[in-house]
Structure formats: structure tokens, C-alpha cells
Amino acid sequence: SIVDNGSHGLPISTYFHINQENGSLYTSRVLDYEQEKVFQVPVEVKDAGSPPLSSTATLHLFIVDQNDNAPTIVHPEVPKGSAFHHAFPLPVEPGYLVTKVVAVDADSGHNAWLSYHLLQESSDVPPFKVERHSGEIRVTRALREPGVSHRVVIEVRDNGVPSLSASLVLLLSSENRAVQDFPKSLDRLPKSPSRAPNLTLYLIISLVAISLVSCVMLAVVGARCFRSGLCVPGWFLSRC
């Protein structure tokens, strides 16, 4: 029989059970290497004597990893059954980085090693390649013609046996760089200040006000001079 010790958080009998007639040990649930790698199972053997005699032993069970998880594409993130649309500017030269596919695998060790592959759906070779270990998608030849769309299928495979995979459909379209940059160039142009007309009006009013004040002051001074008989009238009129 199995002696429960609760060393794994749950009774060990929830993971294994033993045939009391022949001692065969069986699993009671699915075991996952990524969750638990080693189990210690204490067992006890009793005879049918009177009094019964017994002996105990501890079995160390090592779980072997299996390729039970397929890769998961995390970037770009698209709903299942949908394609990812991506536009890139023209012109581009060979080696230009268009986008990058990123995937993860829940397995451990060599089963989690991932490789990226471009699937060719027709005889036409697309002007792109995918880096096997990084997932980077690059241009293989110079592209000049705008408005051309390419359908590219990327498959991500793990290193397990048998290998599991996930795929992604990319719709890559080329756009003219000048068309994309034109709105930006307009934004960078200096804009004439909207308050310039108002500023000119304020200056004119100020000059007129200063001139009026000057004339009033001269008139006051002239009036005093006339009363005292010390000033010539024509001189004040020429000043105002």
C-alpha cells in the first residue's frame, strides 16, 4: 500500500495507486513534467501473519519530458483564422527588416527549441525570407513598385519528436515612402502666427495714442506761452 505523507501538497495517492495483489504501481492522473519532475512515493508491504510484519521503502519516480505543448505565436497577435496585415515603405533594398514573428513554447529543454520557416504555397517565390532562429522577416531583393501585396505563411516548429507547430498568415503590402512622408513634411513647416494681424493693429493704435498725447501736451504748453506773451504762434503749430 501507499503511505501518504503530503510532501507534494496533495496526498500522494491522488497521483498514484498500487495493486495490493502484485505491487504494480499506476498513475491516477496526468503528470506534467513542467509542473512536477520528481515524486517520492513511500510504500509499505505487510504479510498475512499474526501478528503481521511489514516493511517500508521509498520509490523515487522521475518524470520524463514529452513534447506535449505546441508553440504559441505571441507577436503579432491575431485572432485564430485571421491574417496579419502589415505595410512597409518603398523603396527597400535586400536585407530590409519588414517585421518579426515571436513565438514561445511551454515545454522544457530541447523540446522548447523553436525554428521559423517560410511555407511556399505556389511556384512564385516571394521576395522575403525568415530567419530560422530569430523569426525576422527580411526582403531578399530590391522592391520599387508600390501597391503590391504578398501573402506569406510562417510556420513555427518545436524540436520535439514528433514536432509540433503553429502557423501565421501575413499580408505584406508595399507603399510609397513619399506618400507616407508627405503629411509629416507639411506638419514640420513653420506656421505663421495667427495673432500677427492683431499685433499690427495694437502697434498702430499705440502710435496714434502717443501722437495725440504729444499734441495735447504741446497745446497746453502753447496756451501758457500765449498767456505770458513769450512764444510765437506759428512755432507751436509746426510742432503739432
Image: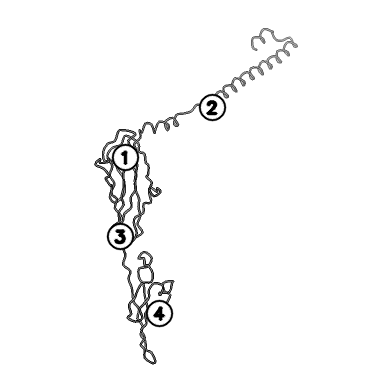
**Amino acid at circle 2:** Ser
Reading the image, the residue beneath label 4 is 3
Reading the image, the residue beneath label 3 is 111
Q: Which callout, 3 or 2, points at the residue further toward the start of the chain?
A: 3
Reading the image, the residue beneath label 2 is 194
Query: Separation of disc 2 and disc 4 at Cα?
Result: 87 Å
- Tell which residue pokes out farthest to the right in this image: 227
- 235 to the left or right of 153: right
Check disc 1: other Cα within 10 Å, few if <14, some if 14-19, many if 20+.
few
Q: Nearer the viewer, residue 189 or 5?
A: 5
- At x 27% / y 44%, what residue is drawn? 121
Q: Nearer the viewer, mark 1 or mark 3?
A: 1
Query: Separation of disc 4 and disc 1 at Cα?
Result: 63 Å
Q: Which callout, 2 or 1, points at the residue further toward the start of the chain?
A: 1
Query: Separation of disc 3 and disc 2 at Cα?
Result: 66 Å
Reading the image, the residue beneath label 1 is 150
* Residue 176 vertical placement versus 151 (above, below): above
Residue 87 image point, x, y percent: 36, 39
* Residue 179 vertical placement versus 135 (above, below): above
- At x 35% / y 35%, what residue is drawn? 175
- Tell which residue pokes out farthest to the front in this image: 21
Helix or strand or loop: what does disc 3 sit on?
helix
* Residue 70 vertical placement versus 55 (above, below): above
Helix or strand or loop: what does disc 2 sit on?
loop
Residue 126 image point, x, y percent: 27, 41
Helix or strand or loop: what does disc 1 sit on?
strand
